[in-house]
Image: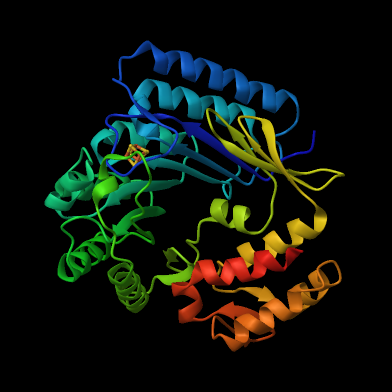
């Protein structure tokens, strides 16, 4: 089995299920024995992957969820300790733990940091208590601010997630949430428009996509003015703080997913395999993988080089024309020998990505 460049570990537990969430997770009390059983199985999977030589090339590790910090101090430290024994952790290995404000404590940050965790991604979503309550989040804005303070005592690599287009939110309260995020001094912010999934409690809420588009533009302006550069459609960072783990996903590096519902990707002699729970769900042929690389590349500010499009066009005869169409529609521009998304391309990402993906055949 080949070595993976990135490792994702999924923790499918939360204190309470948020009103919009359709992720692989379930609400469980922290003293539920199911958490111990899950951790036990996860530790075995980590050791097995290590014995099989699958982890030696991992340059980034990401423990996500769900709510990893809901595992509690002892279990999460145990997991990170096992990972530290199973991987070649270097100073430049990016090791992220997702955290929610209600379950992040100073001793936990201290111990995770000591074991090699060097990036925390905090699920904040909003700094407005009424909006947080409407989303069904279990924390308030004060807890979110306190969580950032706790992490900042040890670690400068902090990301916040914020969400726009949520119930009760106004343009003013959105700007206030952005301003508060900036005032915390974090170096990375991810901004997502709320999307309502079937079967979730918020299903009756009507998302206004025009308002969301305006809010995404406001975010780009405010974060950019404060020095957080947009490097991906939803991601902003100060120089040197772009997420290397997510960049691995967008640049076609093989990654291993461990835990319930975790996704993975690897290249084989047949093409690109996408896995869920360790089982192959989808096989992309090499031409399809080349189309996917271009599509994912256009999520990023730096886009893709003209040479990459020309090379892919030898496998995909319609690809060059697809980029020219995107150019004509103002979704992309050519700059320094690269196709890059324009502001219109950022706003109409689905149109841009489907134009590229549809050119695979
Ligand atoms: S904390 Fe995150 S994963 Fe858990 S229910 Fe809320 S949105 Fe879903």
Q: How many marks?
A: 0
Residue 274: x and y in percent read 68, 42
Query: Quick one: 332 or 120, which is closer to the camera?
Result: 332
Q: Is residue 126 visible?
A: yes
211 to 199, vertically: above or below: below
Q: Taking 267 as reference, is 38 left or right?
A: left
Residue 208 pos. (x, y %): 28, 65
Name the image quarter holding residue 151. top left
Q: Position of residue 272 (x, y in %)?
A: 76, 47
* Relative vertical location of residue 224 with respect to residue 272 in this rendering, above or below: below
**178 or 75, nearer to the observer:** 178
Give ligand 1's quarter of the image. top left
Please state, as top left, top right, bottom left or bottom right, where the C terminus lies in the image: bottom right
Q: Residue at x 65, y 86 (%)?
A: 336
Quick check: can you spot residue 55? no
The residue sitting at 80% across, 69% down in the picture is 312
From the viewer's perspective, tell me whether residue 309 is left or right of residue 336. Answer: right
Residue 28: x percent and y percent? Answer: 32, 22
Most foreground residue, 6 or 73 = 6
Q: Quadrant of the N terminus?
A: top right
Residue 282 vertical placement versus 333 (above, below): above
Which residue is drawn at the image coordinates 45% and 30% (left, top)? Answer: 11
Name the residue at 39% across, 70% down. Answer: 228
């Amino acid at each position: 089995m080949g070595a993976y460049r990135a490792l994702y570990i999924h923790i499918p537990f939360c204190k309470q299920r948020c009103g919009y969430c359709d992720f692989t997770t379930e609400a469980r009390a922290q003293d539920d024995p199911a958490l111990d059983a899950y951790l036990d199985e996860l530790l075995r999977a980590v050791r097995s992957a290590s014995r099989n030589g699958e982890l030696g090339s991992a340059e980034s590790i990401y423990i996500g969820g769900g709510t990893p910090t809901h595992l509690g101090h002892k279990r999460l430290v145990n997991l990170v300790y096992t990972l530290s024994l199973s991987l070649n952790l270097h100073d430049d290995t990016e090791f992220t733990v997702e955290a929610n404000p209600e379950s992040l404590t100073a001793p936990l940050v201290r111990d995770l940091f000591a074991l090699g965790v060097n990036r925390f991604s905090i699920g904040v979503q909003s700094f407005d208590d009424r909006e947080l309550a409407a989303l069904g989040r279990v924390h308030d804005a004060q807890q979110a601010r306190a969580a950032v303070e706790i992490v900042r005592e040890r670690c400068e690599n902090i990301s916040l997630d914020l969400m726009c287009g949520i119930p009760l939110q106004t343009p003013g309260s959105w700007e206030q949430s952005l301003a508060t995020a900036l005032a915390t001094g974090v170096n990375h912010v991810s901004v997502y428009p709320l999307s309502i999934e079937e079967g979730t409690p918020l299903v009756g809420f009507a998302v206004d996509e025009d308002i969301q588009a305006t809010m995404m533009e406001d975010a780009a302006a405010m974060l950019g003015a404060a020095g957080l550069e947009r490097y991906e459609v939803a991601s902003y960072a100060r120089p040197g703080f772009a997420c290397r783990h997510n960049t691995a996903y967008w640049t076609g590096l093989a990654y291993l997913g461990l835990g319930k519902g975790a996704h993975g990707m690897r290249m084989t002699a047949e093409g690109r395999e996408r896995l869920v729970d360790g089982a192959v769900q989808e096989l992309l042929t090499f031409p399809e993988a080349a189309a996917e690389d271009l599509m994912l590349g256009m999520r990023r500010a730096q886009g893709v080089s003209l040479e990459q499009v020309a090379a892919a066009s030898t496998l995909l005869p319609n690809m060059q024309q697809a980029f020219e169409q995107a150019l004509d529609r103002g979704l992309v521009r050519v700059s320094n020998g690269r196709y890059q998304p324009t502001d219109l391309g950022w706003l109409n990402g689905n149109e841009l990505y489907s134009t590229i993906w549809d050119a695979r055949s």
